[in-house]
Amino acid sequence: MKQLDNLTLNERHFRDLVESSMDMIFRLNEVGDFIYLNPATCKITGYLQEELVGMNFYNLIRADKRNQTIKFYASQHQEKTASSYLELPVVKKDGTLAWIGLNMLLEEVDDNGYKLSGIARDITEKVNADKQKENWISRLLVLIENLQEGVLMEDENGKIVLVNRAFCDLFSVRLIPEDLIGKNYVNAHNHIKRVFEDPVGFAKQEEELKKNRHILIGQLLNLPNDRFYERDFVPIYVETGYSGNLWKYRDSTEKVRTRKELMMSRKKYQSVIETMRLGLMEVDGNDNIITANEAFCEMLGYASVNDLIGKPSLETLLDNDQQILMQQQMATRSKGDSNTYEIKAKKADGGYAWLLISGTTLLDANENVIGSMGIHLDISYQKRIAIELEEKKALQQLMEWQERSMLDLETKVLERTSEVVQQKEVIENKNKEITRSIDYALLIQKALLPKKSNLDQVFSENFILYKPKDIVSGDFYFFQEGEEQTYYLAAVDSTGHGVAGGFMSMVGMEKLSLAL
């Protein structure tokens, strides 16, 4: 009884797992009719359980794959193959298509009968992504074929990883592009520098560019016979850091419009996309996003291309000022010209990324413009370095201005100090003259005041307390002998202090002397 309970518990647990699985789990009889299915099967196909039970599984398969699928599972039964795997297109109830990766298990019931048990996973996104990657490779081929500039890309070790026919033509390289892949860029450099009017200067400039790793767009280079090339230089950075350089040359003497064949296999283009993480985006004639690759979504923080498809690219990805810039570039591109420019794009999280865009128009069979495509390179790191350099330059200029201001201030302080010192010397000299005059007035005043010896002859005990406030005083004391042993003694509080008071005291003493 206990064993029976355990078996029942195990069966219930197994059924719970099957019912809660996100994968399709079902059983078919020998003719392919559903005899059991879990809820995930209904969810993926869009049918109700009662609609699927008794329905033939093969009727869900897309018509062009149906007979092939029936033969495959008949062969599995005949050869007694225990399990098999197929990726199949399934038509859902609403008419849309879903791809499933199906593991089919063969279960023999008796000598004449069998059942099939299927476990399938929805792989629609994977299949669509693979198809999208193939489409991108094809479109990239068209894009590079339309480029009129000579392009060469070297990796961080100086090995050439990409070169096009236009580059070979511009510099009269007799090898085909594929013969240059994997070769050392130094050899190419030694060849192309001879084309220019100043080979030594060209080599020095190129060495400086590779040393500093700063983006350079549209540098004009002189060739003999009044010809000119424009050069673009872009250092490549990926998640692991510096990954090489992209060189682009174009003949600015005359606009070459013939398409150049790029001798490189689709596998190599795919490797370039995946290794260099170039973002690709395509818009239709109304500026609506048609598609974008995974690298582009990662650059701007979008989880899936589905978050972008159908949206207007300008409004979705750019602020107003950047929209104006993009519209100007699109006007140039609509004339059939390829162009390269920088743009500040909005990210999904509200931040920003700086992108270097090389764009071209998409044409139909009748050479009518039906949209455009851009290759995007994330240059946020390089842009941030450039901004920091500008900020440092501005700070240096501010410090230099402050230093000049301090020198000017010190000069003015010294000038003002010199003036104050001169004024101080003048005041001190005037003060000395005034003090000498007052001291002389004190001598005169002391000469007029009674002598203490005269008081000592009359008074056996006496004292004089005389303390002027300002050297000379307006107050004074007076002593004079009269007739018949008469003596006049006075302490006079006159008016004022200092020199003026001193004059008053002398006048007062003179008046008293005359009066007596």
Image (spheres, rainbow, N blue to C red):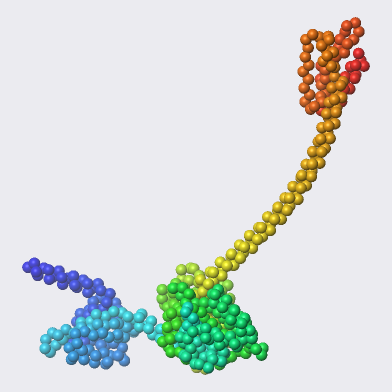
* Quadrant in which the N terminus appears: bottom left
Residue 402 located left or right of residue 430: left
Tally the numbered discs.
0
Rendered residue at 35%/81% (across/down): 126
Q: Is residue 372 visible?
A: no
Residue, far top: 484
Rendered residue at 49%/68% (across/down): 351
**Above or below 298: residue 365:** below
Tell me residue 246's x, y (percent).
52, 81
Q: Nearer the viewer, residue 23 or 463?
A: 463
Q: Nearer the viewer, residue 200 or 464?
A: 200
* Quadrant in which the C terminus appears: top right
Tell me residue 24's x, y (percent).
26, 78
Tell me residue 458's x, y (percent).
83, 9
Residue 283 located left or right of residue 65: right
Q: Nearer the viewer, residue 364 or 197?
A: 197
Q: Is residue 516 visible?
A: yes
Residue, far left: 1
Displayed quadrant of residue 334: bottom right
Residue, far right: 514
Rendered residue at 83%/20% (across/down): 476
Q: Nearer the viewer, residue 324 or 264?
A: 264
Rendered residue at 83%/33% (across/down): 434
Tell me residue 483's x, y (percent).
91, 8
**Above or below 491: residue 61:** below
